Amino acid sequence: MLVLQLSKSSRADSALESFHRSCDYGYKLSSLSCNPLLNLLIKNRRIDEADTVFKVMVRRKFAPNLITFNTLINGFCKVGKLRRAVDLVEDMKAWGVSPSVVTYNTLVDGYCKTGGAARMYKADLVLKEMVESEVWPNVVTFNTLIDGYCKDENCSAAMRIFEEMRRQNVSANVITYNSMISGLCSEGKLEEALRMFEEMKVDGLLPNVVTYNAIVNGFCKKGMLVEAKMMFEEMPDRDLVPNEVTYNTLIDGLCRLGKMEDAIEMKRVMVKKGVCANVSTYNCLILGFCRNKDMDGAKRILDEMGEKGVEADFLTYNVLINALCKDGEVVKAVKLLDEMVEIGVRPTYVTYNTLIDGFCEKDNLRAAFNMRARMEMDGKAANVVTYNVLVKCLCRKDKLEEANSLLNEMLERGLVPNSVTYDIIKEEMMAKGYMPNIDGHLYNTACSS
């Protein structure tokens, strides 16, 4: 009982110590005492310790129940350890505990949040296993799969799941439609999204702010700002209050069309309506000014961020650094790198690769390699993009042997060449009559592509 009380009081260390002492003294604890401890450890992201507790339970024959397994499976899925989660599903079957709809939904969610075609395929297999086990999927199951496929930019698969949902007489809700509409708009399938929007209303479901934001985004992506504004203006008539996502989407749409004065005015309206401009708002404006080659305008927005107490993030600096490098102002770009480090914003691969490319465009190889060294000192090993930029620069300066050595270094580090690498080999090396002395696979691919 002490383990239970300590766990309910959120005293993880004391509860864990009490658990181990109870085991040492030979007490047999029930799942009623152990489950809250497992839950507490997982909430604190102490997943390995939770797994140790479970293994002790099994070794001492403290019978785990459905809650035990679901708690652990949820914990492992949340930290991306899906293989262990799947093993636990098999363990629970061996213990005679049948997986529930919650068990399967947790696995589906784990695969969907990880993303990628292979993971989504496995999520689909979980759905199939559910049906075969006569554990019937519910709206949460289908919504998770639909959202996963939409975020993976595979709306055709999401639509297949949507139709399967209907076949199984599971009613779609607002979340279902929002995922579909958002996914379709992101893929540029605006007409299909608008059909879903109308279908949603026919089903008796009221679109919410998320729905309207998705449609506004769809119109903005197509450059249809008039229609986007019409949707925006319709929101108050539906008792919906536009939020920062709504305004940021419109501001970004205006910036993409180069309508910077209108974008600034939209930000003014946003603030007047009591919606705070955030870092995304300012990033959209900075990117817009940079696209228009108006660095003074971009700098004014950056200064305003500081005045308003909005902290710049890595995207803010990456946009500015990229714009300066494209203008050939690499020295100024490096000063921005120094500034971002000074204020505690961590540079990304994009930051460093942009600067390396900037120096290469200026034919300053020494500075480019120095920036690569700085990048690696920052704990970021050169990636394929880094090597591609440096190899291309060496080739342009007819330093083909050095380029060849760099390619070999890339391969030795276990990096996989991409299509850009092969194009560089063909166009910058082989076209000049130089046959690279490198890994056979890379050479053959370069020749055959």
Image: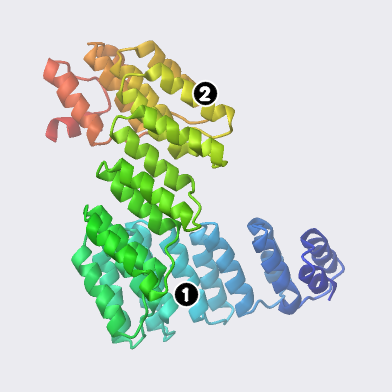
C-alpha span from label 1 to label 2: 48 Å
The quarter of the displayed image where residue 18 is located = bottom right
Of callouts 1 and 2, the N-terminal one: 1
In which quadrant will I find the N terminus?
bottom right
- Residue at the spot 22% in from the left edge and 15% down from the top edge: 396
Estimate the x, y position of residue 426 in percent, counting from the top left.
16, 26
* Camera-nearest residue between 219 and 68: 219
Quadrant location, the C terminus = top left
66 or 213: nearer the viewer: 213
User: Is residue 173 visible to the viewer in this orientation of the structure?
Assistant: yes
Question: Which residue is denoted by mark 2 in the rendering?
Answer: 338
Q: Is residue 321 left or right of residue 160?
A: right
Q: Is residue 269 left or right of residue 167?
A: right
At 15% from the left edge and 24% from the top edge, which residue is drawn? 427
**Which three-letter amino acid code belongs to the residue tagged 2?**
Asp
Mark 2 nearby-residue class (10 Å; few <14, some 14–19, many ≥20): few
Q: Position of residue 31 (x, y in %)?
A: 71, 77
Amino acid type of the residue tagged 1 in the rendering: Tyr
